[in-house]
C-alpha cells in the first residue's frame, strides 16, 4: 500500500510503499549500527521534509538513539550549536553544500564522527549506508517509556536555542 508521496518536477506524486520504507529503515538501521550508533547516541538531520527524513528517524529509533532535527535554512552557527549541545554522533544532510559546511567545523565537535549526505552514492551517503546495512541486518530494539526519542530545539529568539527532550 502507498505510504508517502512526493511531487516530482511535473507536479505528479510518486509514492513509496510501506514495504519499501520498512526495507530501507531496516537497512539504514544496520548501516548506522555499523558506524557505531547505539542506544542513547544522537543522530541529527539537516533537511526539509522528505521521505528520507522518515526513514532516518525510524532507523534511529530502532537503535534506541535520539533524533535531532534541524532546518536547512538555519544559520550555520545554529547548526554548530545544536550539533555540539546535543552531542550528535552522525548527521544526515540534504545537500553536498551543507555537508561541506558541516565538515568545515566538524573538528570542533568531538562527538560528531559522521556527516552523511542524503543524495548520491558512496560510503558517506544514505544509499551507501543502506547498501552496507543490507549485508548485516540488525534487529530493532523496543524503546522504554522513559527513553528519549527526539531532542528538538526552540528557535533561540532569546539567546541560544533550548533543547526539549521528547520520550
Image (spheres, rainbow, N blue to C red):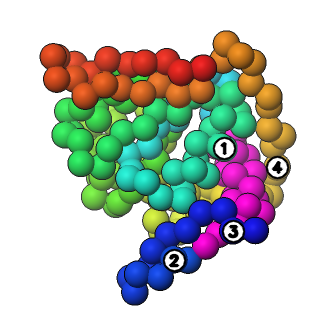
Of residues 12 and 72, the one nearer the viewer is 12
The residue tagged with tag 4: helix, strand or loop?
loop
Which quarter of the picture shows residue 66? top right
Instruction: Spot the residue most to the left.
Output: 158
Disc with the residue nearer the chain's start (4 vs 1): 1
Q: Which residue is mark 1?
A: 59
The residues colored magenta run 15-36
Residue 74 inside the magenta-drawn segment: no
Q: Main structural element of the magenta stretch: helix, strand or loop?
A: helix
Disc with the residue nearer the chain's start (4 vs 2): 2
Cα separation, mark 2 vs mark 1, equals 24 Å
Quadrant that contains the N terminus: bottom right
Q: Residue 31 placed where, x, y %? A: 67, 49
> Is there any visible trace of residue 164 in the rendered image?
yes
Disc with the residue nearer the chain's start (3 vs 1): 3
> Is there any visible trace of residue 133 in the rendered image?
no
Q: Which residue is mark 2?
A: 13
Q: Which residue is mark 4?
A: 137
**Where 12 sits versus 27, above or below?**
below
Residue 28 inside the magenta-drawn segment: yes
Q: Residue 23 placed where, x, y %? A: 76, 59
Q: Which residue is mark 3?
A: 2
Callout 1 crowding tier (Cα within 10 Å): few <14, some 14–19, many ≥20: many
Instruction: Spot the residue most to the top.
Output: 146
Which of discs 4 and 2 lies nearer the camera? The answer is 2
Residue at 70 percent of width and 33 percent of height: 63
Cα separation, mark 4 vs mark 3, equals 24 Å
Residue at 44 percent of width and 43 percent of height: 45
Amino acid at each position: 500500500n502507498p505510504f508517502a508521496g512526493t511531487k516530482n518536477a511535473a507536479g505528479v506524486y510518486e509514492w513509496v510503499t510501506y514495504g519499501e520504507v520498512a526495507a530501507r529503515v531496516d537497512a539504514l538501521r544496520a548501516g548506522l549500527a555499523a558506524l557505531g550508533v547505539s542506544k542513547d547516541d544522537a543522530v541529527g538531520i539537516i533537511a526539509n521534509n522528505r521521505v528520507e527524513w522518515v526513514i532516518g528517524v525510524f532507523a534511529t529509533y530502532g537503535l534506541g538513539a535520539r533524533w535531532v532535527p534541524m532546518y536547512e535554512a538555519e544559520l550555520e552557527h545554529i547548526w554548530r550549536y545544536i550539533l555540539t549541545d546535543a552531542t550528535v554522533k552522525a548527521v544526515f544532510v540534504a545537500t553536498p553544500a551543507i555537508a561541506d559546511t558541516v565538515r568545515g567545523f566538524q573538528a570542533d565537535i568531538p562527538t560528531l564522527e559522521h556527516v552523511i549526505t542524503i543524495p548520491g552514492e558512496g560510503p558517506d551517503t544514505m544509499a551507501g549506508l543502506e547498501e552496507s546495512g543490507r549485508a548485516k541486518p540488525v534487529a530493532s530494539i523496543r524503546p522504554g517509556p522513559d527513553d528519549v526519542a527526539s531532542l528538538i530545539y526552540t528557535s533561540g529568539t532569546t539567546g541560544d536555542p533550548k533543547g526539549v527532550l521528547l520520550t
